[in-house]
Image: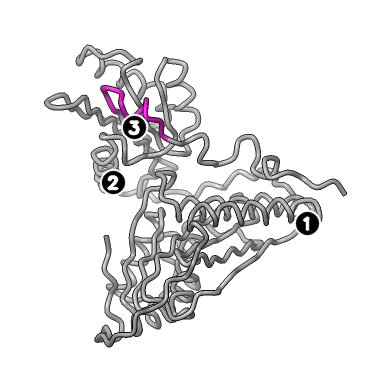
Amino acid sequence: MEKISLGTLGGSSSRTYATREVTAEQVSRRVHVAIAMWEEPWKSGNDAERKGWIIAIDGGKNRRSVCEDGVAERDPDPLAIEALEAELAKLNVSARDVWVVTGKRQIALRSLLQKAGFDVSGSFSPQNRAVRRATSLMQRRRKATSIRVPEGERRRRRKAAQEAAPETQWLPSYSRTEARDVDAVTISCDASSDTHSTGSVCFVASTGDYEVETKSTTASIDDLELVALTKALRYAVRVGARSATIESDSAGALAAAHGMHKRGTDGRRRGGIRGNVRRDYYEAWREASESLDLTLKRVLGHSGDPLNKAADQIAYLAMRASVHPQEASEAALKKGIASSLAEATEGGAPRRRKRRRRGRRGRGQAPKTT
């Protein structure tokens, strides 16, 4: 059987960093714009749904503005672009002077922006000055939308559209645990899913160790991201780390984790995350918090963080490889894993722990967050 290349395994439209890398030209543009789109079901009402946008514009000193709006049962993308152009006209700014960033899933919006002459990136890069304002306002707006719902009607559950999915050929799973007795470790987690039947979870550690597991599952991406956090916690305990910083770009998984740190878990499904997934995480966190200092850290996906980049790439490649025969795709997958690890850890030499006595955190104490 003919073997496939790493490029073929990644796919022509894959979630790769190459299409989202920030250029010096983009950063140097006079005006930075961040567009955050949201889509929220109402808490009541018959299939009610509202879509909206937050547009943050940063043109430098005293040239900042925000516009936001929402619509029901309409495509918000053209309206968002009209709103952006109107705001830029007030500032007397043309499209060639602007760098726009959008969420990574806003493919249609990016296409319309490019047709309108804008330079667009498909990730919320921290190098864009408008990103922090847009994301902060988006979260606030989404919460307010769900609160302002008219009461009295029970929302009907909509049946998810069933799409044909490629048949799973094998379930790639690999790991490496060579570090021992390390003082401090940073572990970045990510997950990838075809949203139908297959998902991959991965963590990559600053020691050069990693784990990727692919399985047949219909779990949500937040489920999978929390599974990756659980694996990272268990790894930190396994290698005898004294402190660990665990990174994730999943706001949903981190919110679930922080909630359990404060209130524990009853093993029920909450926040869209399954009860058994929550329970496994909570048990791993309780065990880890007894023996090491923990910090959970949010990183922006596709923002250039080397460990997050590697975890993202490995999870995605493993999920992609699962729909090709093993004998055709395994070599390319292993090559991709090795390349991602080498780039992220510069060889991944484990750091040996310096022997010193330190007080232990009390049982069940919550980790620091950043």
Position of 141 with respect to 125 (left or right) is left
The residue under label 3 is 35
Residue at x-position 48% and y-position 74%: 235
Q: Is residue 100 above or below residue 273?
A: above
How far across and down, in percent of the image, does residue 38 sit? 37, 39
Q: Residues within 10 Å of mark 3 (few under 14, many from 20)?
A: many
Does the image show residue 266? no
Q: Which portion, as a residue range, is magenta? A: 22-32
Q: Compute the Cα span from label 3 to label 2.
A: 13 Å
Q: Which residue is mark 2?
A: 139
Residue type for callout 3: Ile
Q: Quadrant of residue 341?
A: bottom right
Between tags 3 and 1, which lies in front?
1
Residue 29 magenta-highlighted:
yes
Find residue 21 and report its image quarter: top left
Q: Earlier in the sequence, mark 3 or mark 2?
A: 3
Q: Which mark is residue 225?
A: none
Viewer-side residue, 94 vs 197: 94
Q: Nearer the viewer, residue 41 or 234?
A: 234
